[in-house]
Image (cartoon, rainbow, N blue to C red):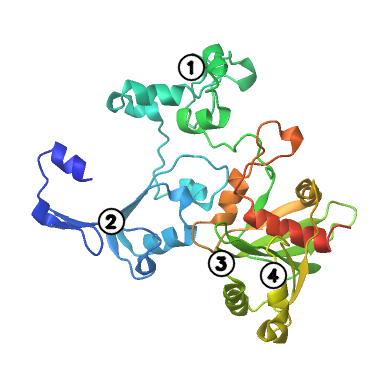
Amino acid sequence: FIEWLKLRGLYDKKKLKEYPKPEYNLHGTPILFRGFSDDENGESFVSDIVFVNEALDCRYNDIVEMQMRNRVCILLDWNPKYTDNPLFLWEKRDNVKFLRTTYRNNIKNLTKEQISNIENYSPWLLEDCKVDKDGHPVIPEAERRPHKENIANGTANKWAWEVYGMGMRANKEGLVFRNVSWIDEFPYEVDEIAYGMDMGIVAATAVVKVGYINGGDKRSSIICELLLYEGLQAPDDLEIVLNNLAIGEKIHCDNNFIGWIARCRRSERLSEMGYTFQPTAKWSGSKDNWITTIKNFNIILVRDKLKGAPLRKEQENMSYDGDSKKGKTKDGCDDAWSAIGYAVVGEFRN
């Protein structure tokens, strides 16, 4: 923003307030720079014009709170790197103008290197990759000619090209859990409920609630809600967190953290609340086992209420590394899914 002002000869350092949070006064109009991690950016934040960058990575409820208290207009931008988000429904509203643009709409402001970096993703010849005004490809994928140079150079990436080059909604290739559906709230009536916990310090400690619905002659379903997603330093932290969650049930746990489960079992407070802790057996190939077990069900996910939408991020990013037949997934993006796996193999395997 400051660079933009300097380019136009408008920048005045005296009008910049950097602390405690950035603010600039432009022609008498205060312009504030905030992040959704700031506590006061919820209900109390009133604005005339709001611009939200990469809105798909923001918590939906935070955006709704801002929009409710906005007096003129709210502008959202995103790369369509997911296939499902409640913001997509806004396109149908009468008071919303939706614009689909790609790098080609901004090509006069991009360097040759920037253009090349994007176009190197294309696995097809560029002239075969045109899209119509609704974002649908003009030439079907099966009829597009391969971009032999990009493929030979190892830069071709179908997902990255569709998202950043063609402006299409797309799931990453090799997604582990591609076929899921989303709901707003955990249903009141399910046949059974189980809890799972994946422990982490640098990675997140994730606690999930998983409901089971018997499908009878049809496929049964699991409904998964993420209750906790944060790094914890010691079992004492876990005791405080579980105390706040007030679940009071058996939790199927990660067994990698030696002493954590024993410490939790010795906690009088957790015992009084009704907690029991069941370590999940692990062996070579156990991760493939719980992935396969989860896929035996219709997978229904409850939209995140936690900041950063970690469950959605994991669903949209947990992918196989290389040959998906090997079953090896990339590191990260599996803390919540691991907790779901522990609950499912512990309670609903059969």
Quarter assignment of residue 20: bottom left
Q: Nearer the viewer, mark 2 or mark 1?
A: 2
Q: Is 152 situated above or below 172?
A: above
Amino acid on which disc 1 is placed = Leu
Camera-side residue of 124 and 275: 275
Q: Position of residue 311 (x, y in %)?
A: 59, 55
Query: Does residue 347 appear left or right of residue 88 in this picture?
Result: right
Label annotation for residue 33: 2
Helix, strand or loop at disc 3? loop
Task: Compare marks 3 and 4 and give the one earlier in the sequence.
Answer: 3
User: Measuring 61% from the left and 45% from the top, which residue is drawn there?
Assistant: 331
Q: Nearer the viewer, mark 3 or mark 1?
A: 3
Label annotation for residue 126: 1
- Cα distance between the residues tagged 1 and 4: 56 Å
Q: Is residue 45 visible?
A: yes
Residue linked to disc 4: 259
Q: Position of residue 206 (x, y in %)?
A: 62, 62
Residue linked to disc 3: 232
Amino acid on which disc 4 is placed = Gly
Helix, strand or loop at disc 4? loop
Instruction: Name the quadrant of the C terminus.
Output: bottom right
Camera-side residue of 89 and 120: 120
- Cα distance between the residues tagged 3 and 1: 48 Å
Helix, strand or loop at disc 2? loop
